[in-house]
Image (cartoon, helix red, strand yellow):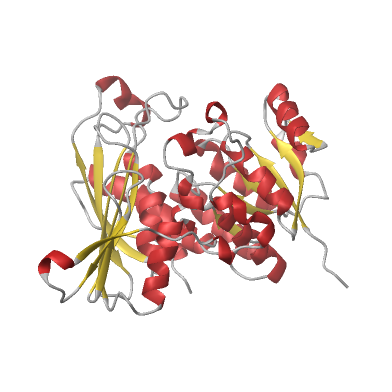
């Protein structure tokens, strides 16, 4: 007998709306409900996509027995609390980044997911982007040789974004650069050391008690001879949007382009010096997906520029990652398997950023990741 589809509800319909048609067209999922505090917005989206169940109260939605899983796309300060509520209500959870804003919330999410046997997945876009999948393929084929060093950055001008952003410590929203340096080798961070650099304008200092324009973190990988370097800026730094990931191997290294839209650069060892670097167009990886959702690696929900979410205006649609994220989550629920990143892995990635900021406040002090963020 054919298994029934997984019933998904989406909470938060800004960025969250990008995922609606992907779930609707995934062969193993049903998008059964949406939730948004503003009635006019939930009705607008519900009418556009033909969704009957519409909630303006998140707690009320969690009482719906038809819903198997909740995909949370709400503001960052709500992620931890809403995930904990969903797990307590017996729902599987996919949540946009970061997992939470405190170590304590991360620990509670890990505890609840284990205690209740529920699946949690942090929807980290970079580890499903085509550029990352290209590097992962090279690594798995052995073409990189021995990996020697990993580096990543996420720089963005957040002026004009919603009110909880101003003054946010850069490393509090660091999963887009921490995720790939840990994700390529499926590594864990053992400890971190971070330095703050520069100063954002004074009126933002009071929001989070953080003055730093840039935070740079060195990550020691657990059970490995490797370290990784990540850096992050949000305000008062002149830079085009850039999520970058670079891997340096003994045979080949791959560097993200400096300018959005340019090709990757692959460096190959032992060639004549001028021939070592080669610009390489990154292939798309829609072939890894069910046919019904392959088109979403290159196309967002809205085809008109004036309707594009800021994730498309800044960041090029997250490297075609959205359908890969949906498929990884739905596949895990169907198979009873663990998605990447699961609750423990997501906690490790997120707590790197939280603890890195604590390190910066203490002049670069080494801080170890707590045991709950490490695999058994």
Between 362 and 50, the one lying in front of the other is: 50
Marker count (numbered): 0
Q: Is residue 220 above or below residue 200?
A: below
**Residue 124's spot in the image, x, y percent?**
49, 53
Residue sitting at the far right: 1
Which residue: 32% across, 24% down? 204
Q: Is residue 222 above or below residue 44?
A: below
Q: Relative to residue 362, is residue 300 drawn left or right?
A: right
Q: Is residue 325 above or below residue 35?
A: below
Between 166 and 17, the one lying in front of the other is: 17
Residue sitting at the far top: 203
**Residue 81's spot in the image, x, y percent?**
58, 42
Which residue: 17% across, 67% down? 275
Q: Relative to residue 291, is residue 81 drawn left or right?
A: left
Q: Relative to residue 184, is residue 123 drawn left or right?
A: right
Between 149 and 346, the one lying in front of the other is: 149
* Residue 186 visible to the viewer: no
**Residue 54's spot in the image, x, y percent?**
78, 34
* Residue 13 visible to the viewer: yes
Which residue: 30% across, 31% down? 235
Q: Is residue 214 above or below residue 108?
A: above
The quadrant holding residue 28 is: bottom right
Q: Relative to residue 208, is residue 304 drawn left or right?
A: right
Query: Quick one: quadrant of the N terminus?
Result: bottom right
The quadrant holding residue 289 is: bottom right
**Residue 136's spot in the image, x, y percent?**
41, 68
């Amino acid at each position: 007998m054919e298994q029934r589809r997984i019933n998904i509800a989406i909470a938060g319909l800004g960025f969250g709306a990008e995922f609606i048609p992907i779930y609707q067209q995934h062969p193993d999922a049903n998008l059964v409900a949406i939730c948004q505090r503003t009635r006019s917005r939930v009705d607008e989206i519900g009418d556009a996509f033909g969704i009957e169940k519409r909630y303006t109260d998140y707690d009320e939605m969690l009482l719906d027995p038809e819903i198997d899983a909740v995909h949370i796309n709400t503001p960052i300060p709500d992620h931890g609390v809403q995930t904990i509520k969903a797990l307590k209500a017996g729902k599987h959870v996919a949540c946009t980044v970061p997992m939470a804003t405190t170590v304590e919330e991360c620990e509670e999410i890990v505890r609840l997911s284990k205690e209740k046997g529920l699946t949690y997945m942090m929807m980290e876009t970079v580890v499903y982007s085509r550029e990352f999948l290209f590097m992962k393929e090279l690594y798995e084929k052995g073409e990189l040789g021995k990996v020697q060093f990993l580096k990543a950055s996420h720089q963005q001008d957040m002026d004009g974004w919603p009110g909880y952003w101003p003054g946010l410590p850069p490393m509090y929203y660091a999963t887009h650069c921490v995720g790939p340096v840990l994700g390529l080798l499926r590594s864990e961070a053992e400890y971190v050391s971070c330095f703050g650099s520069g100063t954002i304008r004074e009126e933002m200092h009071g929001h989070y008690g953080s003055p730093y324009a840039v935070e740079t973190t060195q990550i020691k990988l657990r059970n490995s001879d490797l370290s990784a370097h990540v850096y992050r800026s949000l305000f008062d730094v002149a830079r085009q949007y850039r999520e970058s990931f670079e891997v340096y191997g003994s045979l080949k290294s791959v560097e993200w382009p400096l300018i959005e839209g340019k090709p990757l650069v692959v460096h190959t060892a032992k060639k004549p010096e001028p021939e070592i670097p080669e610009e390489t167009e990154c292939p798309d990886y829609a072939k890894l997906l069910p046919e019904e959702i392959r088109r979403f690696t290159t196309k967002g929900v809205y085809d008109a520029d004036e309707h594009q979410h800021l994730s498309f205006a800044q960041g090029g649609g997250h490297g075609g990652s959205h359908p890969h994220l949906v498929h990884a989550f739905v596949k895990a629920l169907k198979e009873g398997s663990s998605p990447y990143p699961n609750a423990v892995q997501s906690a490790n990635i997120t707590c790197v950023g939280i603890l890195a900021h604590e390190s910066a406040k203490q002049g670069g002090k080494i801080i170890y990741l707590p045991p709950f963020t490490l695999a058994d």
